[in-house]
Amino acid sequence: MDTGQKMKNIVRLIAFFVLSTLLVSQSLVDVAKKEQERREKLKGKNAKVVTNADLKTVKKAPAVTIPPAPPGEAAAAEPEEADMPEAQEAERAYDEGAGSAFATEILLDTAMVENPDFALGSPDGQYAEISLYGSLEVEFTAKNGPGPDIVVHARLAGLEEMAESQEEGIPVGFGAGMQPEIPPMYGVLVLDDRGIWQAIGKDTGSGRPGRFELGDLASSKRIKIIFRYLDVPDTGTVGAKLWRTSEKEITMGIDAVEALH
């Protein structure tokens, strides 16, 4: 390499260092200018210095918080027990052992009754039909209180048709049905705490629901309803056929048995 070429290389190297120095100087000038502007903006503002003592007084808070539901969604939530008086009353009755106010079970001593289950539950227009000399025995809880304690929702059916069918060979003992002034009736008996049936009343089933009082009994859990001619002497009814005799048979329909207390 000749001397001229060496001089060119030296000049180039010097030019590179000069240019680099100028660029660095310019960058430093820009940084200093921006820092000056930033400090000008911060004039008149106080800076808060946080120390370790300050950190000890900071209270912890949950990282995630759930905002309260909007009023519309809150209304759609499940109602509180206080807003359901019927549910409270039902639960209270269950806890006290009161159970249902209506008959809940047909007992085995029931005899000569068509559709006995129709006598369960509240009145619905469906009747358990008791034939003459039949009986319906149900389980429910009735307590002695002021006024009537038990209501029997009943209706007599077939009396007129029975009178018209005299010539059809109706068994002896049913002739009392031909006397309108002496209709067949249903009688109500309740079981006392000694296991003895106590009669508490009777009704014709031809008007309003029959109402009965427990009398001297504090409570009862069984009631028996019998259907027969209760106001006439037994004139041959014993030995009469104890089954349905014709489509026009007279029956006592029991829709429901209700405890008022």
Image: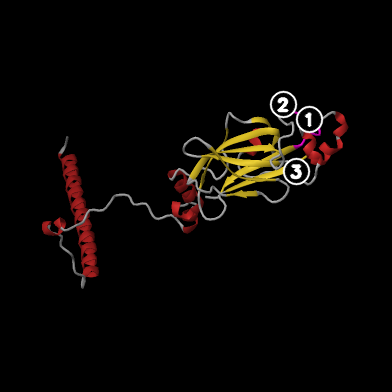
Of the residues shown, which amino acid type is indicated by label 1?
Answer: Val
Label 1 secondary element = loop
Part of the protein shown in magenta: 244-250
Mark 2 lies on residue: 239
Mark 2 and mark 3 in contact? Answer it, CB < 8 Å: no
Measured as percent of width and height from the top left, residue 101 is found at 55, 45
Which disc, if any, is residue 131?
none
In the picture, measured across the screen, residue 19 lies left or right of residue 261, that is left
Disc 1 from disc 3: Cα separation: 16 Å
Residue drawn at the location 74% of the way across and 26% of the way down: 241
Residue drawn at the location 54% of the way across and 47% of the way down: 214
**Mark count:** 3
Q: Point out the image quarter for the N terminus.
A: top left
Viewer-proximal residue among 150 and 39: 150
Mark 2 and mark 1 in contact? Answer it, CB < 8 Å: yes
Disc 2 from disc 3: Cα separation: 20 Å
Label 3 secondary element = loop
Coloration mode: secondary structure
Of the residues shown, which amino acid type is indicated by label 2?
Answer: Gly
Measured as percent of width and height from the top left, residue 65 is found at 34, 52
Label 2 secondary element = loop
Mark 1 lies on residue: 172
